[in-house]
Amino acid sequence: MLMFAIRRILVSIPVLIGITAILFVMLNVIPGDPVALLMKEHASPEVIARVTAQMHLDDPLWTRYFRFLSGALQGDLGTSIKLNRSVTSLIMKAFPNTLYLAACAAVVSWIIGIPAGILSAVRRDSFIDRFFMGFSLLGVSMPIFWSALLMQYIFALKLKWLPVSGFYGFEYVIMPAIVLGWSSAGVIARLTRSSLLEVMRHDYIRTARAKGLREVGVISGHALKNALIPVVTIMAIQIASLLSGAVITEAIFGIPGVGRISINAIQARDMPLLQGSVLFATVLVILGNLVADILYSILDPRIRSQMGRGKP
Amino acid sequence: MKNKVRLLLASGIASLALMSPAIADQMLRISYTDDPKSADVQMTTDYYTLPLNVYDRLIEAETTGPGTSALVPGLAESWEVSDDGLVYTFHLRQGVKFHDGAELTADDVVYTFDRMLNPETRALGTDILNFVAGAQDRLDGKADTVTGLNAIDKYTVQLTLSQPYAAFLALMASPQASIYNRAFTEAAGDQFGLTPETTNGTGPFILQSYELNDSQMLVANKDYFRGAPKLDRILIRVISDSETLRLLFETDEIDVFDMDYASSQTPYFYASDTWKDQIRSGPRVGMYYYHINQAIKPFDDVRVRKAFQMAINREQILEKNFYGKGQLENGVMPRGLSCYEPATPIEYNPAKAKELLAEAGYPDGVEITLAQVSSWSSKWSDMNQIIQAQAAEAGFTVKIKTMDEAAYFAQRKAGAIDAYTQSWSADFNDPDNFFYTFFSEPGTKVRAFNNMDQEVFDGIEKARSMTDPEARCALYRELGERIVQTDAAWVPLFSLDHSYVVQPRVKNFVVPWNGWSDMNYYKMEIAE
Amino acid sequence: MTVSPDLNVDTVEEIQEASLLRDTMRAFARNRMALLGLVFVALLVFLAIFAPIVSPHDPYRMALDEQFLPPSTTYWLGTDNFGRDVLTRIIYGARISLVVGIVPSLISLIIGTFMGVLSGYIGGKVDFVIMRLADMMIAFPSLLLAMVVMYTLGANLFNIFVALALVGWAGVARVVRSQTLALKEKEFIEAAHANGASRVTIMFRHIFPNVVPTLIVLFSLSIPDAIMWESSLSFLGVGVQPPEASWGLLVSRGKEYLFQAPVVAIAPGVAILLTVLAFNFVGDGLRDALDPSMKD
């Protein structure tokens, strides 16, 4: 197991280097000038040229890349061009906010997804099956920017139950967590349903049934335990994908998280900040996958599955 | 995780106290679309709310009425300008204290401007000091001091210019000329302005907290030299989404709604019984315009440019898209700017525009491209869509090209951007702010107008150092006619009012003279 | 959101194509939600193709005197800020959504299948390189990747295809690769090999047909994904540009008028919701039908 983990981490190194290199090249191709953007309407050519030189942004691409790489190896991701602060400190400050949102969203998705999956597996092909699967699919099918808008309109403006936007306490995270969590509940529900159905076909369940155990007993006692293995293991990937998938949610609900930082960074052509936040998100995804794979092989080595990216 | 929850709960409780409308102290809750990045004004060219409230300038531009302003004493009690227009002597007010208790002296002023020009600072706002003698040498690292910057005694500062510059006093009142404290700022180094602990000014408010991408809190400076401000606190939240801002305003979590962020809301607020009496409106000393790049065909031909001017029904855009809240402009200077006088009107005449196009060799019409920026307010792309429909009548086939802001500024800097629409509000009340910015030799290139009219270049340079106000204004008006009528180098559209909606408890809300969203809140009050 | 179809390879290869199709159709027809979804999709395709004929107005004609008219018999869903018919613009938006759902999904399917078969069958260094490439694409925050592409190439429909294909191929490649790996061990592949069939022949004659059912499911499930992506990019302003009528764009512009004319923002959102839901039902139905492990 340890060897497996080490091997996986070693394999990820070229992936990380590749991603940073691709980013560097892309950001060199993409039109834009971070310093001109700092000055916006007041940009004057002399000042842009001077500040660009002062920030060493006019160095050749490879010089800047190796400066970034050697810095990153020593744990220094550089200084943000736009925000003039250390990239590491910016990310570390924003990350707990994103983590909090992602964790709440994950809980929402389990609350909706797991019962829906169980119910529809038990009452397979019935109205209940269709209804619950439909409900969890509804979340996947609603664009976040639209459902967020409706929720703000209804729950904040009309009913005045919840605050519109901001990040100052638990009540502020309710709407974003529901919007984001519901959107990934469908995946959880599908997985729960299909794995429960598969487990229920197995012999020992048939035996249990044949022995006259009641349906509820069979499901809660035997089937569920086994059926939830893939669901539990996929949670690691789910949280990782929620972490990097909360960009629009963070923007609409005013949550100062990593997603907003990375969008700001790309819009500002803030290379060090973008590089840092992408590296960070990538490491999270890789770790999430690794944890999931390890969990899989511990809990049930037979199952191989993937779960893709979350909603944008 | 657990700590985070606890932290959130704690800050939630604290913030609930802050957010709740019925609180004892007077707190104004406003918003900004983006994080200000820093309270150090030398490091920004467009986020002025913090600097305007945390620092003072030697001179202040005070709003004296709708759209009008006067230069009044700030940290400088009085000043003199030598007859040759080169030497400016400022006499500082005595006993002014910085937030950390240090007293303001002439050395602080010298330090502040020297810091701006120090190459180590990497300052962005250096343009205001371009005319100070020795500024360029300091910027280039050729000198360790600025020859034109001198402290005569503890309370007297002298600035010497390399050539007379009529707008210099007005520039000294711009946010960028905010004054810092030497000892504090030197100690803060490159952290200055990034946190409350590393920010220090003389202004009416003190930066108390600064949460990146979330909010900044200002508290009253009880020892302010003009007397303590009426407000106890100002909460500035970062709200990037205009719809969210509107909901926050409607749910009474924000006190001021800036209609600039959602001009489409104008009719709603003017029609609303709740809000129509809460609208505070003032003329903006600013110009909406279409830019034309003469380096890109077919705009190299003056007849095509004239045709484009005539193909736009500005009246209709003003009426339908901006609900008539403004007036048409025909020159380079908008109303409210010193030297302003109405210019020769531009005619809306699609038929004549078509003739002009035919004359220019495009009898079957011609394709042009308009550039727009994806992250900007929808009012710009709406305008382009309307122009697209309007100009079709005159034979223009308009293509709209969208790019992001970074690409836009990069292309513009290179002089290669397609025509676009934008507005420009006065930074300081002088025509130079408009003419030099757009039509001087460096300006016309970096803004990609490429209007290579030597007569205009010479005129603008000449006007900068003219000392007779009347002759100077006459020259500017002449230059304006040449640019709009003869060169047809840009399409002036209109100047608009800047409207805000405020909660009933907000008193003394005055729209700043130039119509900026950034303003000083010293005189504002909150009353239930 | 890409869900792996978990097809059981052992049984797939034994099913004859004809009976596969028959069984699939029968199983699919039993699933009422999937049928409902299919009917909706068919209706949408009809509306999109015949948009100029069926839609009541011109989607681009501006009538600034008819701003925000409430729903009426002339304008079923009212008019927008330029006095354009909201329903007409939604119908034209269906064209964009369908094209954006299908084209990039096809592109990423083709690239992903090619890469996946290559990687799984040839193995070794080729496998390593392709899979690391896929790892990169999957680990890369996809919204950022899509935005970088849109910023670099410019915001228009064609570049959305490029961005989405770039984001989507890696997932397909992974699934196809794991199926190829399983198929490679099968007797009929080894038999073909022994009969002197070339690698190319084996890959495209023998392996490819056996991954087709998976591809169908992947394709049907990636359509709603792509529609969602397009609407998000357009919402962020880096996708389809006005005056084109994309649903995401309609919501993002319409939300400014939520108070005066809520329909302008809500209706296109409902259109996205129903379409994505319908495609998801169809996809689910197809997967259930094509996946023998789900059969009783």
Image: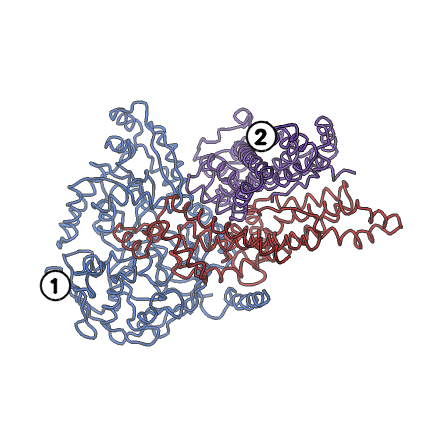
Chain colours: A red, B blue, C purple
| Chain that bears disc 2 | C
C92 shown above or below A214: above
Which secondary structure, mark 1? loop
* Residue closer to the observer: B387 or B190: B190
A120 shown above or below B65: above
Badge 2 crowding class, 10 Å Cα cut-off, few under 14, some 14 to 19, many 20 or more, is: few
Q: Is residue B226 left or right of residue A144?
A: left
* Screen quadrant of the N terminus of chain A: bottom right
**Which amino acid does the dot numbered 2 rest on?**
Val
Residue B320 image-quadrant placement: top left
Q: Which residue matches tag 1? A: B82
Task: State how far apart marks 1 and 2 are (Cα).
Answer: 89 Å
Frontmost of labels 1 and 2 is: 2
Q: Are marks 1 and 2 in contact (CB under 8 Å)?
A: no
| Chain that bears disc 1 | B
B241 shown above or below C32: below
* Residue closer to the observer: C60 or A2: A2
Most distant residue in the right direction: A211
Q: Which residue matches tag 2? A: C200
Residue B391 image-quadrant placement: top left
Residue B381 image-quadrant placement: top left
